[in-house]
Amino acid sequence: MKKLLFAVLCIGGFLSSCATISKDSEPTAAIELNRIDAHTYSNTNEIHTIHLHLDLDVNFENHTIYGVARHEMNPHTCDTAVFDIKGLAINRVTLGKGKEKATEYIIGENNELLGQSLAVKIAENTKYINIYYQTTENTEALDWLKPSLTAGKKYPYMYTQGQAILTRSWIPLQDTPMNRISYSADVKVPAELMAIMSASNPKKKSENGKYHFEMRQRIPAYLIALAVGDMEYTSLGENCGVYSEPKLVEACVYEFSDLPKMIAAAESIYGEYRWDQYDLVILPYSFPFGGMENPRLTFANPTIIAGDRSMTSVVAHELAHSWSGNLVTNATWNDFWLNEGFTVYFENRIMEKLYGKESADILALIEFQDLEAELVRMKESDHPEDSQLKLQLDERAPDDGMTDIAYIKGAFFLRTLEAAVGREKFDTFLKGYFDAHAFKTITTEDFITYLNKELLEPKSVAFNTNEWIYETGLPENCVTLTSDRLDKMKALSNRVNEGENIFTGSFANSQRGDFTSQEWQTFIRGLDQSIPNEMMNKIDAQFKFSTEGNPALKSDWFYLAIKSGNKKLRPEAAAYLNKIGRRWYIESIYQACKDSEDPDDLAWGKTVFAEAQKNYHFVSKSTIEDILYE
Ligand code: BES
Ligand code: ZN
């Protein structure tokens, strides 16, 4: 009863005119969503964390993190501070530092997408709020891996994935990119393991499993990250290196040897790298992304160790986020293209600087092929409006915005702007943009104002910015690219499509190594879905797409196998789906099973998933579940 009273009296203090999340007026606090960011309950407009200190005990025996989140708040005049939680058990909440005093709190109704609000009763002078909590088996950010899923197969592993709104499932905090905080942490892990975070990191294992971390620059909540496992650090140059399991060190050193050059290239384009250190950590295969730009420490999937440096653009991408995304951050998930579109553009500039225009154009062209396919799909989907750069995801998962629109349409918008004003002026503008908004968050509307004021108006350039941002599809003035090398591969796939046996004459002895992965990708994507099994098997016997080399090609190859009704490659496809949890690589294969006219494909997909899902992070597992069972 006491709590109910608190809910009514205190929460009422910041009830405003926006939508209420709880459907009924039961005795839970009807916390309203933040007015600008619809994916948080927090009242950051009234009171916000400025520094967070974490005390964490990572327990591998019961897969639980026992934690205290110590929030230092800004000066305020509030009686309530609202935090986001999801699948967390809150044990108690206290106020003060040194001498703590318990306070009342109330947990709101659970929303499947957003989790719950945690409203804490405070006083006008409250500076410190301490939340004692533990994670549960419903903690979606965490992936606990048994030893068999690691490279070394000897020690367990755990890592977190925060973006977009999963940090609230392992730390109670104001989970909105609108607010930036510094953080520090004291973390205890089993002594045989090492802990690293998106912060200052150890270079060696400690003797007692205790680690201290500092992230002094202010970052949004989705960039707080932790990985714990058997790993070692290998320096790759001044201020950069890689954390990996000992077994992978040699492969990493080869694959990422250009890292110092990449950092230098990035700095030469948009100015100083502001995070002191840039390291990678190679996680187990279940990591649901190719890379995640956690500051100072990019998290990466081992699929980027292709053995031939063909996936290093992922590193360029995550490094580029050190400017676009981490330094200048999308204010809400509706503005996600400001993070990813800028990053894909910048990634390509880094690749161009290092490897020349031809190979950078090839990368961009492949992305453009993806975009074209995505635009066709989207037009026929339930959400054709998702092809606008500015999104409207208010009652949907922020994840729905992770499409080629934000990434590739976003990047082509910037390329087209660059073409309109010239590279030199555009670079000066972008460098100024990063400086002016460093350590700030920005909405699409702020960006448009800045663009008009700093670039288009002074240079008297007319540009269809609103069409690019607020309309669906691709504007006609989008720049185009060509590549002779890719055209040749398309011609080769056309020959196959016309029924020609390409393994005669000059092509008879060609090898996988004669072409780059991007060229092969264009070849595979150019093949008709009606390709006869016999031809596909012949190609596979010669070039070994199903068993060797670049995993992106395997994804495209297994996708084609399902589309063309080729059952022979099923064992290889199943092995691949069991090993790799990178979402973009596996979802198209499961989607092909779902879309197939042959019901046996869906049955096969479900059987594979039943086994393979044990090896996936929640992010991939839930996506595939939706595909197969929706
Ligand atoms: N920040 C993203 C990953 C992400 C986006 C996670 C949205 C959760 C929600 C990361 O930078 C990314 O884009 N990764 C890509 C890399 C690719 C575009 C080079 C990936 O994982 O494939
Ligand atoms: Zn990205």
Image (cartoon, rainbow, N blue to C red):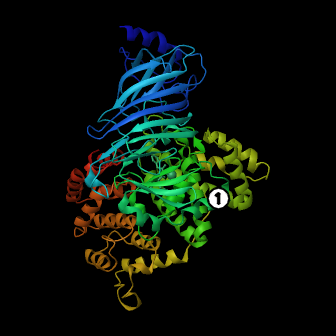
Closest to the observer: 430 or 443?
Answer: 430
How crowded is the residue under tag 1: few (<14 C-alpha within 10 Å), some, or many (20+)?
Answer: some
Q: Please, which residue is most extreme toward the front here?
A: 207
Query: Looking at the picture, how far across and down is residue 87, in whole percent?
Result: 34, 31
Location of residue 12 with respect to 148 vertically, above or below? above
Query: Looking at the picture, how far across and down is residue 265, in whole percent?
Result: 63, 62
Q: Residue at x 52, y 42 (%)?
A: 391
Amino acid, disc 1: Thr
Location of residue 454 with respect to 304 vertically, above or below? above
Q: Please, which residue is most extreme toward the bottom here?
A: 505
Residue 212 left/right relative to 459: left
- Count of marks overlaid on the render: 1
Q: Quadrant of residue 399?
A: top left
Assign a secondary structure to mark 1.
helix
Q: Is residue 591 visible?
A: yes
Q: Is residue 405 visible?
A: no
Q: Residue at x 61, y 39 (%)?
A: 443
Closest to the observer: 252 or 167?
Answer: 252
Closest to the observer: 10 or 625?
Answer: 10
According to the image, label 1 marks what residue? 416
- Can you say which quadrant of the picture contains the N terminus? top left
